[in-house]
Amino acid sequence: MLKTGIEGLDALLGGGIPEGHIVAVVGSYGTGKTTLGLHFIYEGLKNGESCMIISFDEDEQSIIDNARSVGMDMESFSDRLHVVRLEAAEVRRSLEKLESDLPEVIGSVGTKRMLIDSISVLETLFDDAGRYQMLATFRKILKNAGITAIITSEADKYHPTTSKYGLLEYVCDGLISLKVIRKSELDEPTLGLEVVKMRRVRHSRKPKPYMITDSGIVVYEEAEIF
């Protein structure tokens, strides 16, 4: 098990994410998808692991600044943190190049954990068949390398526990849903986390409240939302 760095989430998962799993984290804007992924990477860095972030929309400095804003000093681990900025249009043009180049980069630094943020940027450039092929390519690369990974995605507008295009969850071993929950339209919204699936892990499907604080995400695993 690899700890996520979020105590309440690790408790829900029985200790963390099974090594070698690929986990989708889906949610609407502002629910903390990237922050959850950064926790996972930061935990690995603190444990002396080589970690990689693949980003389609943020450069390395923006990622470091975002992490710092929630209490994670990633600059202190610059020797073990590897940020790869991929242009979505380039990946769209040549999946074959990705399949040949990325494993080399991963192998050269001995990557153990990876965050891919956000796959939705890339998915918009493909039709359904192309999307599945692209996601399957990433899965093959990660599985062959034995990497434990989190892939973030926007949620479907009408079904908050599924990814934007409904394909990512089929190539992942786990799915964590982050959502905004309202008792009624007039009530203040609550953030809720649900472990929708996690292969080989017995877990609760009950959504649990969480907050995004100056120290990152705090999950209240003993509390109820309503």
Image: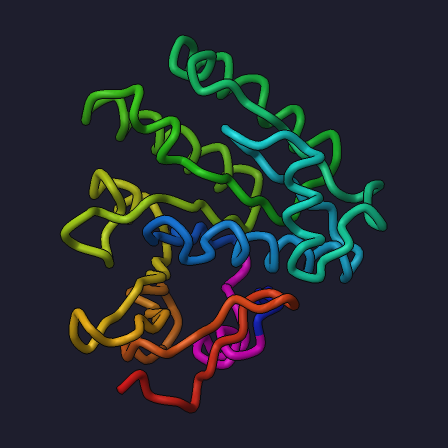
Quarter of the rendering containing residue 111: top right
Residue 33: x and y, percent?
45, 53
In the picture provided, is 62 more to the left or to the right than 146?
right
Quadrant that contains the C terminus: bottom left
**Residue positioned most to the top:** 93
Colouring style: rainbow
Residue 135: x and y, percent?
35, 33
Camera-nearest residue between 226 and 169: 226
Residue, x 31% and y 62% (percent of image)?
179
Camera-nearest residue between 85 and 148: 85
**Residue positioned most to the front:** 186
Residue, x 71% and y 35% (percent of image)?
61
Residue 193: x and y, percent?
37, 69
Instruction: Verify whether residue 149 appears in magenta.
Output: no
Residue, x 47% and y 12% (percent of image)?
90
Quadrant that contains the N terminus: bottom right
Quarter of the rendering containing residue 195: bottom left
Residue, x 42% and y 46% (percent of image)?
152
**Vertical side of 98 occupied by 159: above or below:** below
Instruction: Verify whether residue 12 appears in magenta.
Output: yes
**Vertical side of 209 occupied by 169: above or below:** above
The region drawn magenta spans 7-19
In the picture provided, is 224 more to the left or to the right than 152?
left
Label tally: 0
